């Protein structure tokens, strides 16, 4: 039982780190991205990374192929300094979120989160392989390429919340007023996501969704009105 609980907690923590990575990239790319193809590639890599987490949880042997693709592509962007502006931007955004006008100098923290996002799949797969916990399953290539996350209840929930936070952030950047308008907009989107997945909206999910939208939109509003020193 303890091993099972630890295993679940480990992958929940990984999804939390992945969520922070996603918001970080959205925060920077929303300010303008020079190449559309690179923006789309990063979006797919984030989807692939999320997919890998759920494949690892199922101890799928063929997970090694999407892991190799993600590790190489994400690593190239990492080594060529593509994320340096992301870490600086999130340091600034965090300072605004806690009502500070000065940098918190925590770029190292977001760099560590990106390193976790990048290397965790490879290290975890290596551990599972060495301990002989990897199993060969009849998994389709479409699931390996990104669809496995949509076949899992928790995966659908994570994608709905991620999409909701992303939408609230992007809408919040161009709206400095009418908070209730885009709270309702994103909550409706949240409801549609649950409807498509065949799940009812439980009050706990609804509350979490509202809090997520309010926090993201409030930070966006402060970002557009509070200068940094």
Image (cartoon, grey):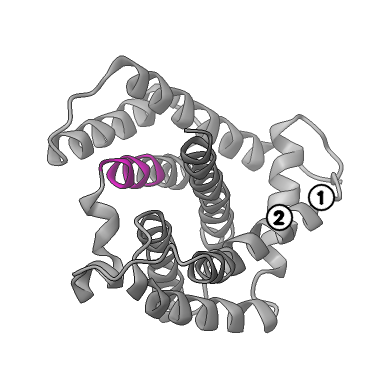
- Given the current orientation, which residue lies at the most extreme front position? 132
Residue at image position (36%, 71%) is: 61
Q: Using the image as rendered, state which of residue 166 and residue 171 is in the foreground.
A: 166
Q: Are marks 1 and 2 in contact (CB under 8 Å)?
A: yes
Tell me where the magenta segment starts and ends, as one range: 153-162
Is residue 108 in view from this perspective? yes
Q: Is residue 63 above or below residue 187?
A: below
Q: Bin the neighbour count of mark 1 within 10 Å (Cα to Cα): few under 14, some 14-19, many 20 and up.
A: some
Q: Is residue 77 magenta?
A: no
- Residue hosting label 2: 110
Residue at image position (29%, 71%) is: 136
Question: Quadrant location of residue 126?
Answer: bottom right
Residue at image position (38%, 80%) is: 65
- Where is residue 204? Give x, y as percent: 36, 18
Q: Is residue 218 above or below residue 81?
A: above
Secondary structure type for disc 1 = loop
Q: Which mark is residue 106?
A: 1
Q: Bin the neighbour count of mark 2 within 10 Å (Cα to Cα): few under 14, some 14-19, many 20 and up.
A: many
Q: Using the image as rendered, state which of residue 49 and residue 138 is in the foreground.
A: 138
Is residue 226 in view from this perspective? no
């Amino acid at each position: 039982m303890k091993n099972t609980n630890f295993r679940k907690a480990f992958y929940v923590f990984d999804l939390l780190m992945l969520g922070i990575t996603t918001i970080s990239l959205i925060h920077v790319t929303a300010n303008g991205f020079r190449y559309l193809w690179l923006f789309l590639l990063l979006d797919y890599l984030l989807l692939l990374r999320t997919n890998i987490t759920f494949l690892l949880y199922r101890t799928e042997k063929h997970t090694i192929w999407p892991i190799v693709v993600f590790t190489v592509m994400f690593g190239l962007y990492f080594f060529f300094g593509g994320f340096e502006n992301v870490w600086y931007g999130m340091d600034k955004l965090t300072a605004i979120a806690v009502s500070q006008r000065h940098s918190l100098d925590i770029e190292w923290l977001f760099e560590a989160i990106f390193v976790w996002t990048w290397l965790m799949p490879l290290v975890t797969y290596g551990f599972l392989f060495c301990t002989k916990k990897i199993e060969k399953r009849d998994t389709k290539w479409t699931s390996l390429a990104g669809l496995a996350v949509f076949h899992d209840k928790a995966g659908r929930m994570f994608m709905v919340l991620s999409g909701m936070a992303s939408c609230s952030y992007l809408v919040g950047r161009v709206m400095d007023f009418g908070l209730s308008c885009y709270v309702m907009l994103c909550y409706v989107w949240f409801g549609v996501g649950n409807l498509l997945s065949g799940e009812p909206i439980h009050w706990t999910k609804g509350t979490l969704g509202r809090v997520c939208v309010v926090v993201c939109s409030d930070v966006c509003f402060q970002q557009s009105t509070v200068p940094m020193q």
